[in-house]
Image: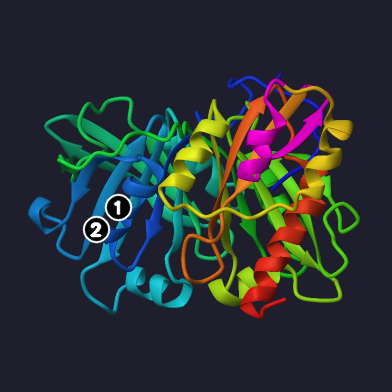
Amino acid sequence: MMSTLVATNTSESSTTDFLPLQGTDYVEFYVGNAKQAAHFYKTAFGFESYAYAGPETGMKDKVSYVIRQNKLTFVLTTPLKTDNPIADHIYKHGDGVKVLALKVNDATSAWNETTKRGGKSYLQPTTLKDDNGEVIISGIHTYGDTVHLFVERNNYAGFFMPGFREWKSNYNPASTGLLYVDHCVGNVGWNQMNPWVKFYEEVMGFKNILSFDDNDISTEYSALMSKVMSNGNGYVKFPINEPAEGKKKSQVEEYLDFYNGEGVQHFAIATNNIVQTVTELQNRGVEFLTIPASYYETVLDRVGKIDEDLQPLQNLGILIDRDDEGYLLQIFSKPLEDRPTLFFEIIQRKGAKSFGKGNFKALFEALEREQDARGNL
């Protein structure tokens, strides 16, 4: 998700925000083999082992591995038997994101405020306790089979939450410098963007801070439309994409076909040194979209002076864009699963609050080359 953006209005205080969010608490993936997935994210992306839940901790029907890097926390969950919602989710979607968990001071209030405004309850406020204190969680449904959990953990001093124990490992690869979730993009079906924009506005109090139509996000062959939703303090941003008419199938249509419905398309993960981070990720086998050399022949004419040398950015395939606040550097991975669904964006902001609108054409053409190679364009 990319664009030019005016500064977000953050004057709305938590006293007037009925759903004050402190950011992303964690992201939970439903996967076919959590043990192997955890090893992959540790090896390739530099996560550390943090917590575990499974039969040994009293959880008989599933296992969950929690991995962490700075303020970025992933939970990888696998069912231990068939004929349950987790197994059904994996059968339908492949490995994918189930939970976007949001930090709150009051999970009960978050549930009350969102459900009374039309949110469909996923989990009523539930208190989890152990010797280290308590965590209160609640949740609502959003697009597709994705859910938002509200996590209140002010009174908990243990590992992750009750039901989990510390996961120690002798295998701890070095960090790659990933910091936190910058934004998270959802793909929804034809003509479903505006209904979900309305959902975030009315149910969660978000604002539409930016919109793109098919004139902004298009190539010779395909197009999509997108709107960026942000909560009051700007800590949580959820761009929403829908397909638009084009000569051939868009990346959103390909996603919807292979994910079998709406879901999370990608996370943008922040770093303070994108050259160092991407170099390390590539050395560990992470694959990124390739950008033609012609992009770099004119990019500085468009974005102006930057602190970095251009050649390392070109060597790595990092894109550059500027807005009124500064500039940003970004790069997009290839899909992380065999299905062409979820991928990651690595982003470094040098003042810019935007999403890389100037890179749309280069990025989408790169995506189309991958689609074409798969026979899905």
Q: Secondary structure at mark 1?
A: helix
| Residue 118 left/right relative to 175 | right
Q: Which three-letter amino acid code belongs to the residue tagged 1?
A: Ala
Q: Secondary structure at mark 2?
A: helix
Between 132 and 159, the residue placed more toward the observer is 159
Residue 318 highlighted magenta (yes or no): yes
State the image coordinates of residue 177 (x, y, percent, origin top left).
45, 31
For the point 46% across and 58% down, which residue is it? 97
| Residue 221 left/right relative to 353 | right
Give the answer, above or below, for where 30 lies relative to 150: below
The magenta span reads 307-325
Kindly identify which numbered label has been placed on residue 38.
Answer: 1
State the image coordinates of residue 347 (x, y, percent, origin top left).
60, 36
Between 139 and 38, the residue placed more toward the observer is 38
Whether residue 241 appears in this view of the structure is yes
Kindly identify which numbered label has been placed on residue 35.
Answer: 2
